[in-house]
């Protein structure tokens, strides 16, 4: 049975060490790779976006590689991909997946455990990626500046930095943090249990952090319920452009909904390079 420590309220988190909820918010959602796979099984448009944007690149660094949802397709088409992630369970799942790939694909992937703000690799890449809202785990300006310095240090002189971020949605920011948003039931993949599932949205306008608490309650044992926290900083488009500018990057293009042609607008793809 997955068990995690109780998730403090925003007020409690402010009183205690703020790094504790940040650590939970960055890691808890990624402790069960099979559940993660179930959540995003139908997400494909970002894979197509990154395949298009990296079509000519042979060396790629991906921050937030997870268990390979994007890195594997890039390696299969011939790129050498180095993946960095903070979640050990996701990296272990990635290694299991690699074991089922042909040797040439396995040989083109290198996995590294580390904090994307601090991890230093002794090489540069044609393209650096920060995929599927990984950037939203940078909770303050210091985090962003550390990370963008890492990106600069790992890019070749003419290299590109590519990332995607969801847009802040007013209806989510305004939700009542005490109200559960439920689905009738789901089967939790690691255990096969049928559980009641609900999400609670708690947005702090001062820090611009959205805390989503996901609660799982087994039908056969409600007292064994557990919660998982996902914390995302909310960045507005002009804010991201300014952060790029003042950290030495030039935005080359912005891609609404990652060029998938859908509406309404809920995410952006960013392509940038170091300003010389």
Image (tube, rainbow, N blue to C red):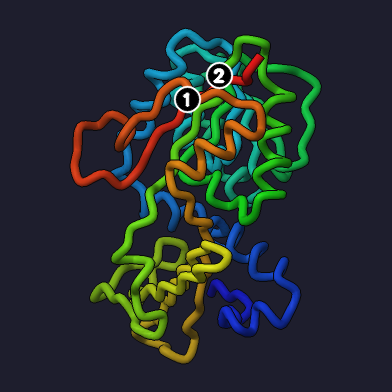
Q: Position of residue 74 (x, y in %)?
A: 47, 21
Q: Position of residue 159 (x, y in %)?
A: 60, 14
Q: Quadrant of the C terminus?
A: top right
Q: Is 53 left or right of 156, judged from the image as shown?
A: left
Above or below, 95 against 216 in this view is above
Q: Position of residue 197 (x, y in %)?
A: 35, 75
Q: Is 125 left or right of 219, judged from the image as shown?
A: right
Residue plotted at (67% across, 11% down) = 157
Which secondary structure lies at badge 1? strand
Residue plotted at (55% across, 72% down) = 2
Nearest to N terminus: mark 1 or mark 2: 2
Above or below, 94 against 49 in this view is below
Above or below, 233 against 102 in this view is below
The residue to which callout 2 is attached is: 160
- Which of the labelled discs sits on residue 98, or is there none? none
Residue plotted at (31% across, 34% down) = 256
The residue to which callout 1 is attached is: 271
Mark 1 crowdedness (10 Å alpha carbons): few <14, some 14-19, many ≥20 = some
Q: Is residue 169 visible?
A: yes
């Amino acid at each position: 049975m997955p068990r995690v420590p109780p998730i403090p309220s925003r007020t409690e988190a402010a009183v205690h060490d703020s790094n504790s909820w940040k650590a939970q918010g960055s890691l808890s959602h990624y402790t069960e790779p099979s559940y993660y796979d179930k959540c995003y099984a139908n997400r494909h448009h970002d894979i197509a976006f990154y395949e298009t944007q990296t079509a000519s690149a042979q060396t790629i660094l991906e921050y937030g590689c997870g268990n390979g949802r994007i890195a594997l397709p890039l390696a299969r088409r011939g790129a050498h991909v180095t993946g960095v992630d903070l979640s050990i369970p996701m990296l272990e799942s990635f290694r299991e997946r690699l074991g089922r790939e042909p040797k040439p694909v396995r040989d083109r992937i290198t996995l590294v455990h580390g904090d994307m703000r601090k991890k230093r690799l002794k090489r540069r890449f044609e393209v650096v990626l920060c995929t599927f809202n990984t950037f939203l785990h940078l909770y303050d300006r210091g985090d962003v500046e550390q990370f963008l310095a890492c990106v600069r240090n790992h890019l070749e002189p003419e290299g590109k930095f590519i990332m995607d971020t969801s847009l802040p949605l007013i209806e989510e920011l305004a939700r009542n943090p005490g109200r559960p948003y439920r689905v009738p039931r789901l089967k939790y993949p690691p255990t096969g249990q049928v559980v009641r599932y609900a999400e609670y949205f708690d947005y702090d306008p001062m820090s611009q952090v959205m805390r989503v608490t996901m609660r799982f309650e087994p039908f056969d044992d409600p007292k064994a319920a557990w919660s998982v926290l996902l914390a995302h900083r909310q960045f507005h488009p002009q804010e991201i452009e300014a952060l790029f500018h003042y950290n030495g990057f030039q935005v080359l293009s912005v891609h609404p909904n990652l060029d998938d042609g859908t509406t309404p607008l809920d995410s952006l793809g960013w392509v940038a390079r170091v300003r010389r």
